[in-house]
Image: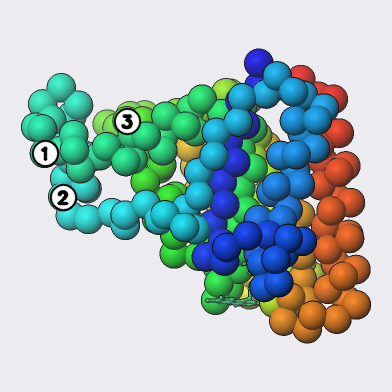
């Protein structure tokens, strides 16, 4: 049975096809998950809404706890890492991660960055040994077969690679980098542009992104998980 982890990170409530001023990324993730379940009804879906309930940013106490060996962790350290453990357990369970990540000031929203900082953790998702031959850091989820779909939206246009604002887009690249660091390298994308213009170019862009999603659902569903 496939486990799909559905993550939303928009600060906006509701999806743009349901309410005015709703979120496009919520619309895209909902479409992906809806279509996936239609084709694979046995899928177990986990849902995490970091847009509405942000994980806490890491603190000095969190870092102290994370870099203390598990067998000598005190109770306050375990409590400090409790939310991180829950979020990591979800990632470990997931075969397919579908993340809605809007562009806020050229990168992911702070809520999603806090999520990343909670799931990229020494001893749980990456290894570190300063005495190791070669590379002292290594991904613990490599070869797990996990796949990631990043569904984004932005107000302006031309953020695709080579586009007029391509060099300013740090959304997909930063999410890819963090997930590759823990070993998730099979990554797919779709994005909406022109949100701020709210004209026929936005409508075209939504149609195009939804088409990419439909293709992704069938492509990823046909290859084994
Ligand atoms: C705080 C904030 C920052 C934003 N920064 C950018 C930006 O840097 N570039 C851009 O093109 N659009 C920017 N936008 C527009 C959003 O990317 C756009 O509205 C997108 O559709 C938001 O995703 P959502 O519809 O899922 O909420 C910003 C919006 C907000 C609320």
Do we see residue 35 in this rendering? yes
Can you name the residue that lies furthest to the front here?
Answer: 19
Residue 123: give its label.
3
Q: Residues within 10 Å of mark 3 (few under 14, many from 20)?
A: some
Residue 76 image label: 1
- Contact (Cβ within 8 Å) of mark 1 with mark 2: yes
Using the image, determine if residue 69 lies above or below residue 1.
below
Numbered mark located on residue 61 in the image = 2
Disc 2 versus disc 3: distance between alpha carbons?
Answer: 17 Å
Q: Which quadrant does the N terminus fall into?
A: top right
Residue 21, horizontal then vertical, whole percent: 67, 73
Q: Quadrant of ligand 1?
A: bottom right
- Residue 136 x/y as whole percent: 36, 36
Which circle's residue, 2 or 3, is located before the other in the chain?
Answer: 2
Query: Which mark, residue 224?
Result: none
The residue drawn where x is 74% and y is 23% is 41
Q: Secondary structure at mark 1?
A: helix
Q: Please state the total of marks drawn on the protein image.
A: 3
For residue 163, side relative to residue 1 (left or right): right
């Amino acid at each position: 049975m496939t486990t799909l982890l559905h993550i939303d990170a928009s600060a906006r409530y509701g999806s743009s096809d349901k309410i005015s001023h709703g979120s496009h990324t919520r619309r895209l993730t909902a479409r992906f998950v809806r279509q996936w379940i239609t084709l694979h009804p046995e899928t177990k879906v986990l849902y995490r809404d970091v847009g509405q309930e942000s994980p806490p940013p890491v603190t000095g106490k969190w870092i102290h706890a994370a870099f203390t060996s598990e067998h000598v962790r005190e109770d306050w350290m375990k409590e400090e890492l409790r939310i991180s453990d829950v979020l990591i357990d979800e990632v470990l369970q997931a075969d397919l991660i579908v993340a809605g990540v809007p562009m806020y000031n050229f990168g992911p929203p702070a809520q999603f960055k806090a999520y990343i900082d909670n799931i990229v953790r020494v001893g749980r998702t990456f290894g570190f040994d300063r005495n190791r031959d070669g590379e002292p850091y290594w991904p613990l989820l490599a070869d797990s077969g996990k796949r990631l779909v990043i569904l984004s939206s932005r107000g302006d246009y031309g953020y695709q690679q080579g586009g007029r604002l391509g060099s300013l887009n740090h959304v997909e690249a930063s999410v890819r980098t963090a997930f590759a660091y823990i070993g998730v390298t099979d990554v797919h994308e779709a994005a909406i542009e022109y949100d701020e213009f709210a004209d026929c170019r936005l409508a075209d862009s939504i149609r195009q992104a939804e088409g990419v999603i439909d293709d992704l659902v069938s492509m990823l569903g046909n290859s084994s998980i």
